[in-house]
Image (cartoon, rainbow, N blue to C red):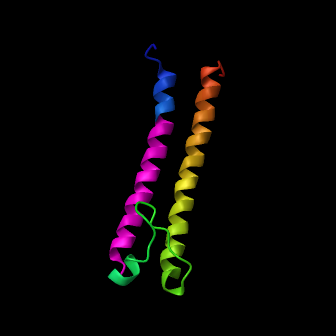
């Protein structure tokens, strides 16, 4: 495969997806670490740390959903970028 500027532009999409996923995983790991030990033991498996449906986890679950939404927005932007790069690769102006 030849070195191509379009390839470099497509790698931006991969970088954004990986960075957003890693950012979310790091934030969730930090939130789980800050929970009291009794609550931490009731969490799901790492790295997702899904919270059970209990009142004690209401704030944690809300932040978990918010972080997931931010990650999905970043993935959406990466997908739009990838469509744009595909358009450029197919000869668009």
Residue range of the region highlighted in magenta in the rendering: 12-36
Q: Is 24 situated above or below 10?
A: below
- For the C terminus, give its image quadrant: top right
Question: Would you say the magenta stretch is mainly helix, strand or loop?
Answer: helix
Task: Judge left or right: residue 6 versus residue 31.
Answer: right
Residue located at (65% from left, 20% from top): 90
Q: Is residue 84 magenta?
A: no
Q: Is residue 17 magenta?
A: yes
Where residue 19 sits in the image (x, y, percent)? 42, 48
Residue located at (55% from left, 67% from top): 65
Task: Judge left or right: residue 78 versus residue 24.
Answer: right
Residue located at (37% from left, 60% from top): 26
* In-front residue for pair 93/20: 20
Where residue 21 sits in the image (x, y, percent)? 46, 52
Where residue 6 sits in the image (x, y, percent)? 52, 23
* In-front residue for pair 88/14: 14
* In-front residue for pair 70/60: 60
Residue 53 appears in which quarter of the rendering?
bottom right
Residue most extreme to the top: 2
């Amino acid at each position: 495969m030849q070195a191509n500027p379009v390839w470099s532009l497509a790698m931006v999409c991969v970088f954004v997806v990986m960075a957003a996923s890693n950012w979310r995983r790091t934030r969730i790991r930090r939130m789980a670490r800050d929970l009291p030990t009794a609550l931490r033991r009731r969490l799901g498996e790492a790295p997702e740390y899904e919270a059970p449906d209990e009142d004690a986890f209401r704030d944690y679950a809300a932040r978990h959903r918010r972080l997931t939404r931010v990650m999905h927005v970043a993935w959406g932007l990466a997908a739009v970028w990838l469509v744009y790069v595909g358009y450029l690769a197919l000869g668009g102006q």
